[in-house]
Image (cartoon, rainbow, N blue to C red):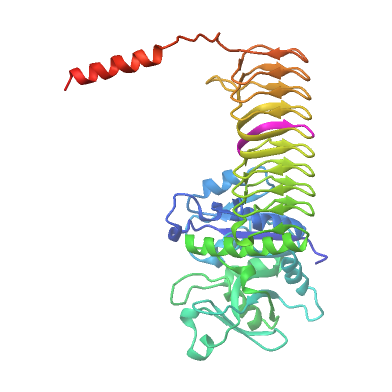
Amino acid sequence: MSAQPIAAVILAAGQGTRMKSTKHKVLHPLAGQPMLFHLLDSLSAANVTRRVVIVGAVGEQVEAAVAGREVEIAWQREQLGTAHAALQAKDTLADHDGIVLVCFGDTPLLSADTVARLAARLGDADQPMVAVLGFRPPQAAAYGRIIADDAGNIAKMVEFEDATADERAVNLCNSGVTAVRSADLWPLLERVGNANAAGEYYLPDIVMLAIADGRGAVVIETGADEVAGINSRAELAAVEAAWQDKRRARAMADGVTLVAPDTVFFAHDTQLGRDVTIEPNVVFGPGVTVADDVVIHAFSHLEGAAVATKADVGPYARLRPGAMLGEGSRVGNFVEVKNTTLGKGAKANHLTYLGDASVGADVNIGAGTITCNYDGFFKYRTEIGAGAFIGSNSALVAPVKIGDGALVAAGSVVTRDVAADALALVRAERADHPGWAMRFRNKQKAAKAAKK
């Protein structure tokens, strides 16, 4: 880690027209959170003390999204190139004396370790003026090229459009991620010209300026997957797939069984204990914590939920935000749980909705039970005491309390509290009418025949 404080300038001024979206490109989700937030998290992990996002087109969206995340905003009103964009952070970072890392909001997988390596390289004995992050993709395509020796000393950097055939044959490519001391960066950026095929002010040109000054520039390398940029929906899907593959591998290495790994999808913050078994086609939204020895059956969806040890979920279960399943509890097929706590050993095996409720230990919720928690204007809570039994096809109209050990008979509509150990039986009195069904059928048949 560099001994000098690090500030990051994150370029996000382009809307990303190839996404074909009214949403800013860097706000499109990757593993359940905006791609920009992945980068911000890595920068925080690398002890980056200041983070300035350069915005332009629909920048208000980005500004609103990062509110409260200790991020500063600077505007690029005209899209004149990456060097011009980075220069817009000069006033914001006027009091920063240290290293400045320039990176990109649409390159979300840049790691904290790589940020640290790049910044630390500036402090090595040769004291380079600029450190650049390079990579070697399978297809170099239109990436800018880095011409360097085996020690990483850069002789030349050139954009693809301006490169010769020999330069295009080089497979060491420029990611654009660059580290420079603040005292050097702003003067370098101000000297960049736009005499190139695109007429833009290119950030990589500071490398050639540093070399011309005799100060030198160096490259360190990383894998192509870490600096994969996202400019289209297809590229977003490809990065998502790569991220999910790595997360699945990590889960299995940490002691999780994935029956069909390619069908399980994690969020950026999914936490899993050991000896968890996850069956096919399970999706984790953000905010899920799963303890040890849990089984999550096929086709379940979890978001904002906490699942305690030895609990059993699904198949076809949906855990929504605020669902908290206690030790050994059971949520079965076609059960939805929202903002509800299930106590130890409680179970709702099938066809049930539990919303805004607390369910005590060892409660049995019969099939077809619902907590009626919403009157069209407000939400209300249902409290079910330990050991209670809720019969099938019951409706618990909140606010309502079911006492410990109480029994609600099947088919009941409960609108008042039920005392502990009481039976609540809410049904109309049965009335049988012998022969009525036959007389009805005969009458209807006769009426139908009369119309022919």
**Residue toward you, 34 or 217:** 34
Residue found at x 74% / y 51%: 271
Q: Is residue 201 magenta?
A: no
* Left or right relative to 29: residue 92: right
Q: Note whether residue 410 is visible.
A: yes
Q: What is the quadrant of the C terminus in the image?
A: top left
For the image shown, how many numbered marks are present on the structure? 0
Q: Is residue 339 magenta?
A: yes
**Looking at the image, residue 276 lies above or below residue 116:** above
Q: Main secondary structure of the magenta part?
A: strand
The residue positioned farthest toward the left in the image shown: 452
Residue 45 image position (x, y, % from top left): 76, 57
Q: Note whether residue 92 is visible.
A: no
Residue 262 image position (x, y, % from top left): 60, 61
Q: Quadrant of residue 152?
A: bottom right
**Residue toward you, 135 or 66:** 135
Q: Quadrant of residue 350?
A: top right
Residue 25 image position (x, y, % from top left): 51, 55
Residue found at x 51% / y 64%: 235
**Looking at the image, residue 22 lies above or below residue 397:** below
Residue 79 image position (x, y, % from top left): 47, 61
The range drawn in magenta is 334-344
The residue positioned farthest toward the bottom in the image shown: 166
**Residue toward you, 423 or 21:** 423
Q: Quadrant of residue 310?
A: top right
Q: What is the quadrant of the N terminus in the image?
A: bottom right
Residue found at x 51% / y 66%: 81
